[in-house]
Amino acid sequence: MPIHNAKFTSFGSYVPKKVITNFDLEKIVDTTDEWIRARTGMMERHYAEPEEAASDLAYIAAQRALEASPLKHRDIDMIIVGTVTGDHAFPSTACILQKKLGMKNIPCFDLSAGCTGFLYSVDVAKNFIENGTKHNILVVGVEILSKVTNFKDRSTCVLFGDGAGATIISRTERNDISRIIDSVMYADGSQSDLLYQPAGGSRMPASQETVEKNLHTIYMEGNRIFKNAIRSMYAAVDELLRRNKLEAKDIDWIVPHQANIRIIESLADKLHFPMNKVIVNIEKYANTSSATIPIALDEAIRDKKIRRGDLVILTSFGAGLTWGAILARF
Ligand code: ACO
């Protein structure tokens, strides 16, 4: 039994202004709007400007989450940023964000779990709150995948967009109905080579050859990931439901990672869960990796779809391979 409960206090999000439609992509790679829409559900995505970095997007999302909460900057006692496209290999984007927000003397770190980065970060924050160590933790999922995209590879370059979503996870009273109830997180490193960025780390440092061969961009075996994604997210959600003696019909909303509308529909189908209770915004933003779930949550709360008291499941899948699910009463 944890000492305290943790809850989502508020959300904020930001996507860069530049919109890239499927028709724009038709001009640079051998693809069609029809293929992208039919195979992925995506219609447009947002790209950062050359001078914009992850911490710039994260800063705006974080400010919006703070403004939507009753908290002041000085109330935040930890920052966790889920990202694989941070400003630099080091220092962490969380430290750069701390500087921008003017927060002092708190621990800040990044967490790398691909598209599951936000859920992993929320899970870590939940534990710090529940064991009584922290009171209010700023968690951000941010990604600028357009800067690690190979625009010669049509099977990946149409899939990704840039964006940031932020939340504040806070300690809450025992009688507060809002709380993060349960979570499951998993990884299977034996499949790490299905989705990765080959160069730029200590395995293959940057060289003229790595740049010429486009090895600093995303490599993905989409087909093999596709089947894994449905199976793993289903297993994670099913485990959460069983452990909490719930059935799918007890859940008000599912907010899944937005990687492919066919993955989302297959997941809903396997769970016998109606699509009109699944939050989908993939048509507007495409796959923003660790930012998809907090952006979707922020929009769904502002649109008054998800309301206080609703029982919500978040689930994601990504590089690692990693996956997980979170059950929360909003
Ligand atoms: N435009 C036109 N044709 C295309 C395009 C494109 N953009 N991309 C691929 N094709 C073609 C292929 O060349 C292939 O042609 P062929 O039959 O002549 O060989 C055909 O379309 C089918 O290719 P598939 O790869 O089998 O297409 P699929 O239906 O599997 O869709 C996709 C590909 C969208 C990548 C899908 O597999 C997918 O969504 N995978 C999961 C991605 C994911 O969830 N990743 C994890 C999260 S991402 C992260 O962590 C950063």
Image (cartoon, rainbow, N blue to C red):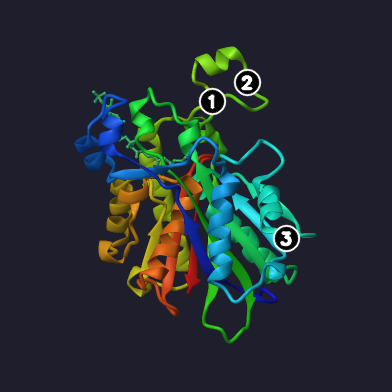
Q: Amino acid at mark 1?
A: His
Q: Which residue is mark 3?
A: 103
Observer-nearest of 114 and 15: 15
Contact (CB < 8 A) between labels 2 and 1?
yes
Q: Is residue 316 above or below residue 180?
A: above
User: Which residue appears at 65% of the width and 21% of the height?
Assistant: 205
Which is in the foreground here, disc 1 or disc 3?
3
Observer-nearest of 255 and 22: 22
Q: Amino acid at mark 2?
A: Ala
Specify the quadrant of the image occupied by residue 201.
Answer: top right
x, y percentage for residue 33?
A: 22, 37
User: Which residue appears at 55% of the width and 37% of the height?
Assistant: 51
Could you tell whether 55 is left or right of 280 in the image?
Answer: right
Q: Which residue is mark 2?
A: 206
Q: Is residue 325 above or below residue 203?
A: below
Contact (CB < 8 A) between labels 2 and 3?
no
Cα separation, mark 2 vs mark 1, equals 8 Å
Specify the quadrant of the image occupied by residue 202.
Answer: top right
Residue 238 in sight from this viewpoint: no
Q: Earlier in the sequence, mark 1 or mark 3?
A: 3
x, y percentage for residue 241?
A: 43, 67
